[in-house]
Amino acid sequence: MATPFAVYLHVPFCTTRCGYCDFNTYTAGELGSSASPGSYLTALERELEMAAEKLAASPEGLRTADTVFVGGGTPSLLGAAGLNRVLAAVRSTFGLSENAEITTESNPESTDPEFFADLREGGYTRISLGMQSTAQHVLQVLERRHTPGRPVAAAKEAQRAGFEHVNLDMIYGTPTETDDDVRATLDAVLESGVDHVSAYSLIVEDGTAMARKVRKGQLPAPDEDVLADRYQIIDARLKDAGMDWYEVSNWSKPGGECAHNRIYWVNGDWWGAGPGAHSHLGDLRFHNVKHPAKYAEQVAAGQLPIRDTEQLTAADHHTEQVMLGLRLREGVPRSWFGTGAKPVIDDFMERGLLQVCGERVALTEAGRLLADGMITDILVAEEQ
C-alpha cells in the first residue's frame, strides 16, 4: 500500500496576535512593507513549482496530494480568491488524488456566506473554524477577537454552502473558565451541526503574552486536575451526541475524521510550503525559513526556502510512530515495543491505562488523560 502524501500550506498572516499563540504568524504592523499577501502568494506558487520539480527528479518521483491543508495564521485573510489561487497552484504542480480532502482553517470573523460558497466552488471539501469558547470572558483572556456567537453562525453558513465536513476548535482550561462555560460551549458546538470537534487543553507557551502574565502572577497557570475534569466533560458530552474520539484531542461523527491530520499521526509523508512550514519525506525532515520577507526573497532567487534538514534514523522513526500512533484510538502493534518497555506496559495495563486489542496496544479512557506522560515513560524504558 502506497504511503499517503499530503501538502500543507502555511499562511503567516493574522490581524492581531492572540496572547496564547506561539505559531509562526505576523500582523501587518510587525511586517510593515517587507511582505504582503500578494508577494506571499507569488512566492508560494513558485515554491510549489520548485518542490514538484525536485520530487519529479527524485527516485520516488512526483507524488499526487491525497490531502491539502491550508493553515496559519489566518488563511481566510487571503479571501476566497487567494485561497482558490493557492489550491490551483497545488493542482497544477502536485496534482490532486481522486476524492482528495482539501481543508482550510478560517477565522469566523473573516468569513461570510459568499466566502464559503466561493471556496466550495473552488474545490475545498472541509472547513476548520477557530471557536475556542462561547464565553466572552474566556475569549478576552485568550485575546481572541471574534464574537461568541460567530463561530456557530459561520459553521452553519459553511454547511449551507455545501460543506459536509466542518470542524470547530475548542480550547479548555483557560484561567477564569468554569465547567459551565465548557458545557455552554459544547451546547453551541452541537447546535451548529458540525461533524468534527478538536478540543485542546490550554498550554502556556514560553515567550507568549500569556506566559508573561502567568509569570507575573496576573493569571493563574492551568491546573492539571481541572484540565482532566474538563476533558471528561467534553468526551462524555460528545460521545452522547454520537461523536467518537479517534485521536486524543479529536472527535467526529462516522466518516468525519480529518484525513490530513491522520497522515501526520501515522507518520506519513508531506510537503510543507510557506514561511516556517515543516516537511517530512521518508527519512528526511526539513523546514523553511520563518520570516515571510526572507522566504519571498529566497524563492525569488530560485532557491527552495529550506532552512534546516534532518536525516531521520530508524530510532527516530520508532519514537515518532509510538508518540503519534499511541494517541490514536486503534493504538499501535504490540510488536513495535522493545523488551525494555514490557514491564512499563504491563504496569499500565494492570492500572487500567492501556489495553490489548488483538495484536495492538491502545489507550483506555483513563489512559487518555495521562497519554503524554505514559508515552514518555515507555520510550525512556526502551532506551534503558
Image (cartoon, rainbow, N blue to C red):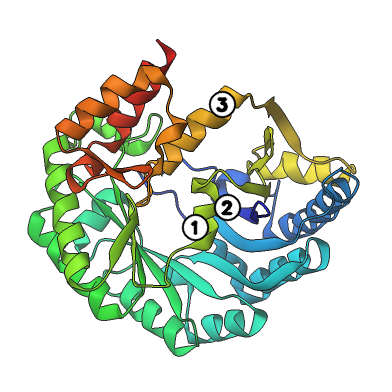
Camera-nearest residue between 97 and 213? 97
Residue pictured at 71% horizontal, 46% vertical = 34
Determine whether label 3 and label 1 are within 8 Å by CB.
no
Amino acid type shown at disc 2? Ala
10 up-or-down from 129: above or below: above
Amino acid type shown at disc 1? Thr
Residue picked out by circle 3? 316
Residue 186 shown left or right of residue 244 in the figure = left
Amino acid type shown at disc 3? Asp
134 up-or-down from 266: above or below: below
Mark in front: 3 vs 1: 3
Q: Which corner quadrant of the image does residue 323 belong to? A: top left
Residue picked out by circle 2? 28
Q: Quadrant of the C terminus?
A: top left
Residue extending furthest toward the front: 358
Crowding at mark 1 (Cα within 10 Å: few <14, some 14-19, many 20+): some
Residue 253 shown left or right of residue 313 in the figure = left
Whole-number angstrom distance, CA of label 2 to CA of label 1: 7 Å
Camera-nearest residue between 160 and 263? 263
Q: Secondary structure at mark 2?
A: helix
Residue 129 shown left or right of residue 180 in the figure = right
Q: Secondary structure at mark 3?
A: helix
Whole-number angstrom distance, CA of label 3 to CA of label 1: 37 Å
Q: Is residue 216 visible?
A: no
Q: Which mark is residue 15?
A: 1
380 up-or-down from 308: above or below: above
Determine whether label 2 and label 1 are within 8 Å by CB.
yes
Name the N-terminal-most of marks 2 and 1: 1
Whole-number angstrom distance, CA of label 2 to CA of label 3: 38 Å
Q: Is residue 113 visible?
A: yes
291 up-or-down from 77: above or below: above
